Amino acid sequence: MKHKMGRPLTIAPNDYRLARDEIDGWLGYPNERRALIIGIDGADGAGKSSLASWLGWQLNMATISLDLFLVPNTGVIKWRSAELRNVINTRVASWSPKPVIVEGILLLKALAQIEMTPHRSIWLTNDNFDASDGLAEERAAYESEFDPINKANLKFRWPKNS
């Protein structure tokens, strides 16, 4: 069975389908396919990777996880910026530009380090999130400096598990 716009129809949370349909509009689908950077931000465990993977599959888009660019053993969250810039530019600024989903914690900070911003963004919150991961101060500073919640075009809150 196919989705009304030709995409596979699968069982997914309503918010996933809402995000997919909203992104279709951002991209100009079906008449266009704008080379946008779609950002998915939120705390650890909020569901960013799951949503990004599902959207990438549904929308036939590449997804980039900031986790792949983390510099290990630094004591702070730091990315291999030159490599991240190159991967994103390969998608959106190449001879054949295409949209891309970039997901990860502190997304706007990572993109600011490479002088980029997402064209649209999604913020995820999960009531099951455990803030005892040692990043509370870094997250608070990030939210104060970059204001990702208010800048997000879509916001989703996953409820506590029963």
Image (tube, helix red, strand yellow):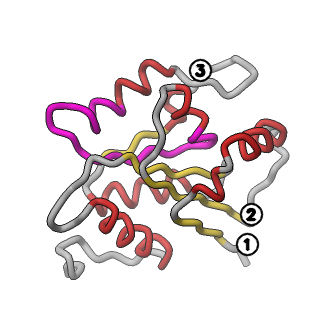
Q: Is residue 21 above or below residue 116?
A: below
Give the mark toward the camera: 1 or 3: 3
Quarter occupied by residue 8:
bottom left
Q: Nearer the viewer, residue 60 or 141?
A: 141
Instruction: Determine the residue positioned at 31% across, 45% down.
Output: 62
Callout 2, which amino acid?
Asn
Residue to which mark 2 is pinned: 128
Residue to which mark 3 is pinned: 71
In screen coordinates, is 72 left or right of 138? left
What is the magenta range? 88-108
Q: Are marks 2 and 1 in contact (CB under 8 Å)?
A: yes
Tell me residue 114's x, y (percent).
Answer: 49, 26
Q: Is residue 115 above or below residue 142?
A: above
Q: Are marks 1 and 3 in contact (CB under 8 Å)?
A: no
Q: Is residue 103 magenta?
A: yes
Callout 1, which amino acid?
Lys
- How far is mark 2 from mark 3, CA to CA? 27 Å
Q: Estimate how packed mark 1 is, as few (under 14), some (14 to 19) or many (20 or more) residues with alpha carbons within 10 Å.
A: few
Callout 3, which amino acid?
Val
- Please, what secondary structure does the residue beneath circle 2 have? loop
Instruction: Determine the residue positioned at 70% across, 17% down.
Output: 74
Residue to which mark 1 is pinned: 160
Quadrant of the drawing holding the C terminus: bottom right
Tell me residue 97's x, y (percent).
Answer: 21, 40
- Please, what secondary structure does the residue beneath circle 1 have? loop
| N-terminal label among 2 and 3 | 3
Q: Estimate how packed mark 2 is, as few (under 14), some (14 to 19) or many (20 or more) residues with alpha carbons within 10 Å.
A: few
Tell me residue 10's x, y (percent).
Answer: 33, 75
| N-terminal label among 2 and 1 | 2
Q: Is residue 67 above or below residue 16?
A: above
